[in-house]
Image: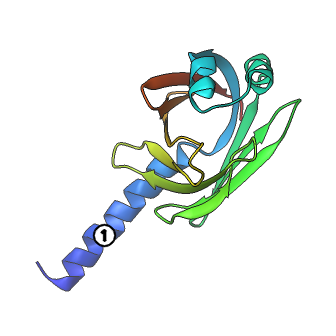
Amino acid sequence: MGEHSIMQLKAAADQQLNSLAQNFVGKWELEKSENFDAYLKELGINYFLRLLSRAIRNTLDISLVNDQWRIKVFSTFKNYEIKFVLDKEFQSKTIDGRPYKFLFHLDENGKLIEKETKIRDTDKDSVITRWVEGDQLIVLMESGDVNAKRFYRRIK
């Protein structure tokens, strides 16, 4: 295979990934959660914050400009924003202020996989997988043996 053909294949693959990425762009409103409290408890989140998290109906605003992603979380309690480039690890804080290493990857099936690696011994690693089905964003959160899901509806 010639160099030109390899470049064409890479361009086609990049275009397909960009198309998959665009599925996430927009505003999403939380509809329901499954096992979310158990997931937060597994992460060591205190009872008060877990109670608040269950009561809040948050909204996500996901944007993508060139290779820069941004996920904004809006709620009546606290707003949060994280910016990232796929496949580049960086250090930041979770919505509740815990320091973590983050790595985001978009797989060939269109799933956005976020790996949160603990920095402090008292914290726990977590994997958050997001995918779109129609006008629904599904978020699977995993830590230890605990899984939770959140379901969002596209509003824009």
Looking at the rendered image, the quarter that the C terminus falls into is: top right
Number of callouts: 1
Q: Residue 110 at what x, y percent from top left?
A: 41, 44
- Return the residue found at the far left: 1
Residue 150 position by quadrant: top right
Disc 1 is placed on an element classified as helix
Q: Position of residue 96 (x, y in %)?
A: 75, 41
**Horizontal arrangement in the rendering, residue 146 relative to residue 121 (left or right):** left
The amino acid marked with disc number 1 is Lys
**Seen in the image, is 69 located left or right of residue 141?**
right
Q: In the displayed structure, does residue 59 sit left or right of residue 65? A: right
Quarter of the image where one finds residue 75: top right
Q: Is residue 99 above or below residue 56?
A: below
Residue neighbourhood size for the residue with mark 1, other residues' Cα within 10 Å, grouped as few (<14), some (14–19), many (≥20): few
Q: Residue at x 56, y 57 (%)?
A: 101
**What's the coloring here?**
rainbow
State the image coordinates of residue 18 (x, y, percent, origin top left): 47, 57
Camera-nearest residue between 10 and 82: 82
Residue furthest bottom as drawn: 3
Residue labelled with disc 1: 10
Give residue 22's position: percent from left, percent from top: 54, 49
Along the viewing direction, whichever of 94 and 123 lies nearer the viewer: 123
The quadrant in which residue 54 appears is top right
> Image check: 55 left or right of 87?
right
Judged from this view, the residue extending furthest toward the front is 121
